[in-house]
Image: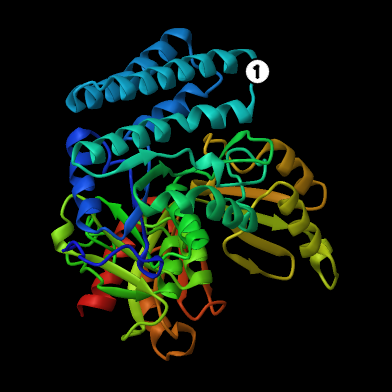
Amino acid sequence: MFIASESPISVSKLTVAKFGGTSVADYAAMQRCADIIIANPQTRVVVVSASSGVTNQLVALTQAEISSDESKALIKKIASIQYQILDKLGNPSDVAAKIDRTLSHISALVERLKLIRSKAVMDELLSQGEMCSSIFFAAVLREKGASASAFDVRQVLRTDSHHGRAEPQIEQIAELVQTNLKPLLADQVIVTQGFVGADSEGNTTTLGRGGSDYSAALLAEALQAYAVEIWTDVAGIYTTDPRLAPNASPIAEISFNEAAEMATFGAKVLHPATILPAVRQKIQVFVGSSWAPEQGGTWIRHKVESEPVYRAVAVRRDQTLLNLHSLQMLHAQGFLAETFATLARHKISVDLITTSEVNVALTLDKTGSDSSGQGLLSEALLQELSQHCRVRVEDGLALVAVIGNNIASTAGVCRRVFEVLETYNVRMICQGASPHNLCILVDESEAANVIRALHENLFEA
């Protein structure tokens, strides 16, 4: 449970808190989150996602095939969520005016998209959910007696111009945060938007779906903060998803390396990129439930007391296996270099890779597609690859990862894992590149059973 500190604000203890969509879903949820902020005076920056469901509706509005009637219905749903919060807040005129302007802007952007299919316009549209929730959350804090204001993160979170999945510019962010954001923290709480940035021309960009965690960590890094708190709808990180294995247990403390593996391989309570800024500055990260803060959560730290061989089992669904076959690989140089150069030109990141004499198998994470929902494997990419190899694509797969410590150098790990997999068809096994994971690729329909069996064998035996 978080208890208010009586000490004055100090830079060494400054905390950045992030609240996800379910945590700011409505007025009551925002009130619970506001209580968490007020209970810890060291929290001076709050990063919020859009209210639950809003981003999905905004994504739907970006689709080319959407009809005028469907657009109007979606805009009405988005407006309904905002006006319900506004009504509970008492309809303060200044907040109402800002929300009305934002909703009008959404309608205008939708009309603009009908004229020009621009990813820049899409990003501007997708950012509006966070704009609304930051306005509301600051108002809820003020209602509770705190000094708080909404701040447009585009003033400080500089990115490149890769709309839909923009790359943060770390040095520029640090300079802008120190100049434009840090001076505001002395006497108020600043509420800002996750997932959103701006390029050097001031155009709105987005960091990709789930990027609010990343935003919080980037701001914490630039502020040299003491901690980042990720508030979600679960009480920390578990040994696996409790919905898949009822005996899954909460983890009180894990290392950066373990958390990075868990986030990368599907632990949805944490965005994979969040760990990177935290590692760079050794900023500890807390993951807890905004619905039950008294239950505590998981601390992610540079050093931990215990480093077990088995820490967790994670799953990442919606995976694609890309199989490339070419006789040019046989006793030749350059095939892999050419393949990866092609993937790089199309901004494709490869997860796992296995090779034979004439085949390369690569896994790609479709859940990492950009915020507009566009797929990774474009026709242009497949055609370019087909010029120097035969391409086969398999979808409907899931990546299951056993995560822990010294896995590659601990005898018996493979035996315990493989005995569970005896009755399942495994498309790929990858182990040895990292001491922290052993990964298997299975049919998505079998993933839940594989997770349950692995968890029972590794953690409950």
**In this rendering, would 97 be left or right of 158?**
left
Q: Position of residue 312 (x, y in %)?
A: 33, 71
Examine the image and state in which quarter residue 93 appears.
top left
Q: Amino acid at mark 1?
A: Ile
Residue at 64 percent across and 25 percent down: it is 118
Residue at 39 percent across and 88 percent down: it is 412
The answer to whether residue 333 is visible is yes
Residue at 38 percent across and 17 percent down: it is 100
Residue at 32 percent across and 35 percent down: it is 51
Q: Position of residue 332 (x, y in %)?
A: 85, 70
Q: Which residue is mark 1?
A: 116
Q: Quadrant of the N terminus?
A: bottom left
Instruction: Report helix, strand or loop for mark 1.
Output: loop
Q: Position of residue 454 (x, y in %)?
A: 31, 70
The answer to whether residue 318 is visible is no
**In this rendering, would 452 be left or right of 113?**
left
Q: Nearer the viewer, residue 245 or 168?
A: 168
